[in-house]
Structures are given as C-alpha cells and as structure tokens.
Image (cartoon, grey):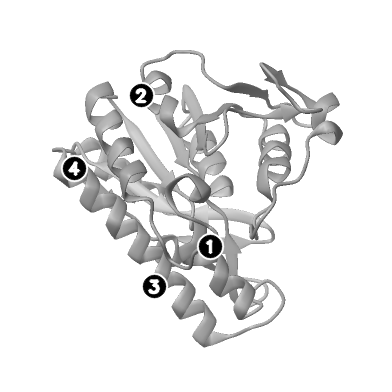
Amino acid sequence: MIVVKIGGSAITDKGVFKKAKLDVIERVAKDIAEAKPKKLILVHGAGSFGHPFVVKYKLKEEKNLEGVVKAHMSCKELNTIVCNAMLEVGLKPFPIHPLLTFKLHKGRITFDAEIFEKALDEGFIPVTHGDMVYDVEDKFFKVLSGDDITLELAKVFKAKSVGFATDVEGVYVEGKLADVVTWKDLDKIGFSKGVDVTGGMRGKVEKVLRSGVRARVFHVSKLREFLMGKCVGTLVFGNVL
C-alpha cells in the first residue's frame, strides 16, 4: 500500500484564487499511470481552492455556515479536476470527500475505512483531500488538512510507503536540502511563505515526526520515481515522543 499526498502548493497557484496548475495535475496523473502502483490512496491539498475561504470566514476561530459550505464545495471542485485528469489517462479514481466520511472526536480523526477498502478491492484509486469535517465535541466543523488525513490513512492501512509531493525538492535545514530529518532538526526548518492555514513545511514535518510514520518529502516532479520505490527528496524519520 502506498499513500501519497500532493500538496496544494504543487497543484494550485496559491497566489491566485482558485487557479489550478493543470499541467502539473496532468503530469501527476500520467506519472501514476506509468508507475502502475498496485494499491494507492491519493490525497491532495486544498491550495488556493480551500485556504482562502478558511481565512475569509475565519473558520479556524469562528462558526460560519456559509464559509463551511463554500470551503467544502471549492475543495470538491479541485478534487473533480484531479479525478478528471486521472480518468483521461485511463486511471479509475474514486473521489472520497472528508466532509461526509471523516470526523474529529476528542482531537482524534475517525473515518469509515471500509469505503477506502471496498474501493481498493474493486480496483479504484481512492482520491481524498483536505476539507471541513465535523467535530463531535465542539458540534461544528473544523479544518482537517490533507497532511493529517495522509498520516491517519498511512497508519490505519499500514502503508509501506508514504510520500508528500510538494513544490520544493524536499526539506531544507538551515538552508540546505536534507537527506534525512529527525526531531533534532525541527527548529532549523523555516516557515513557509504565503497563505497556508495548515502549518506549511515546518508544520508538515512536525506532524510526521509526531505520528511515528516514516515519510518522504519530495518535489512533485519526482512522483513517478517515488511510486516505483526510489529514494527521492528527504526522509522524515517519525518517532513518537
């Protein structure tokens, strides 16, 4: 099992509202088709489709029904673009929207794993994304990042390979591309620039480290190589505190 997340910055222009990088999305689809992974779950970020609504409606601080709906519908729109690109190259994507299938319960992610299992058994590639999901305690919807979804899926399905395809070559520690990153390197990683409501690179690395998952962070152009088992980008060596 491979679980890979395509970052929002890689497939959208975060500086332009709801602008997809169609050439990158098409390349992602082709890379998957050429690599032919036996079992793959694909996750993608929301980028300039989801993040602006989170900021505009202050969805991390306030309850706003209109904001929740608009954020979800925009994330779903990007998901449709990704799935259509996959269909064009003969792949069989199976869109799964977290708003309907995931929940937060006392800070923990719960979801219907059977939906993913059945889709995989039938030969589909589940394609899910960052989204708004219901928080059982707060009785309202919160942002659930594609990073968090990826790590949860990796643990539940005991993925042999976990990857984060981004718009950079890997993780930079003190300005240099690192082959391996562990806890000791965390404070030397800079914060990402631009609008990112889910923590940027430093937040991504910290989540991986806390999860106990081993994952590779690499440029999206290296996706085919990653899917074929090659060592690309930076290995983030997760270890629970």
Residue 162 picture location, percent across and down: 50, 29
State how far apart marks 1 and 3 are (Cα): 18 Å
Quarter of the image for residue 80 reads: bottom left
Are the residues flagged by discs 1 and 4 in contact, CB closer than 8 Å?
no
Disc on res. 224: 2
Q: Amino acid at mark 1?
A: Lys
Instruction: Return the residue at label 3.
Output: 73
Q: Nearer the viewer, residue 117 or 233?
A: 233
State how far apart marks 4 and 3 are (Cα): 22 Å
Q: Nearer the viewer, mark 2 or mark 3?
A: 2
State how far apart marks 1 and 4 are (Cα): 26 Å
Residue located at (57% from left, 46% from top)? 147
Q: Amino acid at mark 2?
A: Arg
Are the residues flagged by discs 4 and 2 in contact, CB closer than 8 Å?
no
Labels 4 and 3: the sequence-earlier one? 3
Disc on res. 202: none
